[in-house]
């Protein structure tokens, strides 16, 4: 039965990254004004469809370029293992592109249409850019995921700024500087996930001319880069809490997550085998979700 192969290709373990930022901004928005639950559901649906689209496209693109091969350390990909054909994956990419478009369009009709046509048009273009970027990360004559630093930049934009600040605007129709700091905090943590993925597959990426930050810096400097982005995320998150309620709940959960992030950084510094990066990647995904959920839920108290 191929359903389990499609679930594997969707990389379910990474999907909390889409949930965390949008849920966080929803909780904060709900504490400041009454927000439609339908808007939240449509936001989550669109984000999940886009991330699955990106994961399918990554499976397809890396198979075409040869990055997915027997030397790759990470989880085996479905096309690489012959579980899903290239033509099947190509159809799935098309289907999820269409689903992402209509889900995003319904979201805009729910939140913006008739209120501000200019904002509607900007977000409409944003949907098209998100779909295009989800595909172009690994597919095309020069995928941007293969260009040094571009993957990190786009992860910051899509999983940080747009996920938190962008969805917050849809909920409230207000741009907020404190939410922007929080979006950068979430964004840096998501960049950390990508960096762990790239450190894990550094040797294979170098051989296949995928010039990620770790390939450019080397493993030791890539670890320092990882340490920096985690620490700057903690600082920005702490600054956001300082600007807001500073409740016991917020401080408790922030310190709790802070401790585990510091332990995570320590583990990264002392890793000797690249395959262990995969375990830390999964831990960081869970920490990001807990970070977003816990800080957000405290605003409802």
Image (spheres, rainbow, N blue to C red):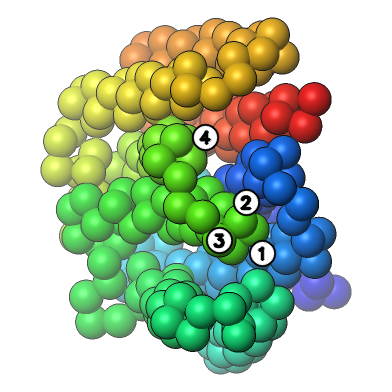
- Say whether residue 264 is visible: no
Query: In this figure, which residue is indicated by the disc labeled 1?
Result: 43
Q: Is residue 175 above or below residue 274?
A: below
Q: Do the residues labelled 1 and 2 touch (CB within 8 Å)?
A: yes
- N-terminal-most mark, 1 or 2: 2
Res 22 label: 2
Identify the image quadrant of the N terminus. Answer: bottom right
Residue 30, picture quadrant: top right
For discs 4 and 1, the disc positioned in front in the rendered view = 1
Q: Residues within 10 Å of mark 2 (few under 14, many from 20)?
A: many
- N-terminal-most mark, 3 or 2: 2
Q: Is residue 141 above or below residue 258?
A: below
Residue 236 as seen in the image, left or right of residue 104: left
Residue 272, picture quadrant: top left
Residue 270 as seen in the image, left or right of residue 88: left
- N-terminal-most mark, 4 or 1: 1
């Amino acid at each position: 039965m191929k359903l389990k192969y499609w679930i594997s290709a969707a990389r379910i373990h990474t999907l909390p990254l889409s949930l965390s930022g949008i849920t966080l901004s929803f909780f904060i928005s709900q504490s400041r004004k009454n927000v439609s639950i339908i808007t939240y559901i449509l936001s989550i649906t669109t984000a999940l469809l886009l991330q699955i689209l990106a994961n399918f496209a990554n499976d397809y693109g890396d198979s075409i370029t040869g990055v997915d091969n027997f030397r790759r350390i990470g989880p085996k990909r479905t096309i690489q293992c012959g579980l899903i054909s290239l033509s099947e994956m190509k159809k799935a990419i098309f289907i999820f592109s269409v689903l992402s478009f209509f889900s995003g369009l319904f979201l805009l009709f729910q939140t913006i249409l008739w209120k501000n046509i200019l904002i509607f048009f900007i977000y409409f273009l944003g949907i098209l850019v998100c779909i295009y970027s989800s595909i172009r990360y690994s597919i095309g004559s020069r995928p941007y995921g293969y260009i040094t630093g571009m993957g990190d930049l786009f992860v910051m934009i899509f999983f940080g700024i747009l996920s938190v600040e962008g969805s917050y605007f849809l909920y409230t129709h207000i741009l907020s500087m404190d939410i922007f700091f929080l979006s950068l905090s979430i964004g840096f943590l998501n960049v950390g996930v990508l960096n762990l993925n790239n450190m894990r597959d550094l040797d294979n990426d170098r051989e296949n001319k995928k010039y990620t930050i770790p390939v450019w810096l080397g493993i030791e400097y890539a670890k320092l880069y990882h340490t920096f982005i985690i620490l700057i995320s903690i600082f920005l998150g702490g600054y956001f809490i300082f600007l807001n309620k500073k409740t016991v709940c917020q401080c408790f959960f922030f310190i709790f997550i802070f401790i585990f992030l510091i332990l995570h950084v320590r583990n990264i510094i002392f890793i000797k085998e690249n395959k262990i990066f995969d375990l830390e990647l999964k831990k960081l995904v869970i920490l990001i979700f807990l970070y977003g959920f816990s800080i957000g839920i405290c605003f409802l108290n």
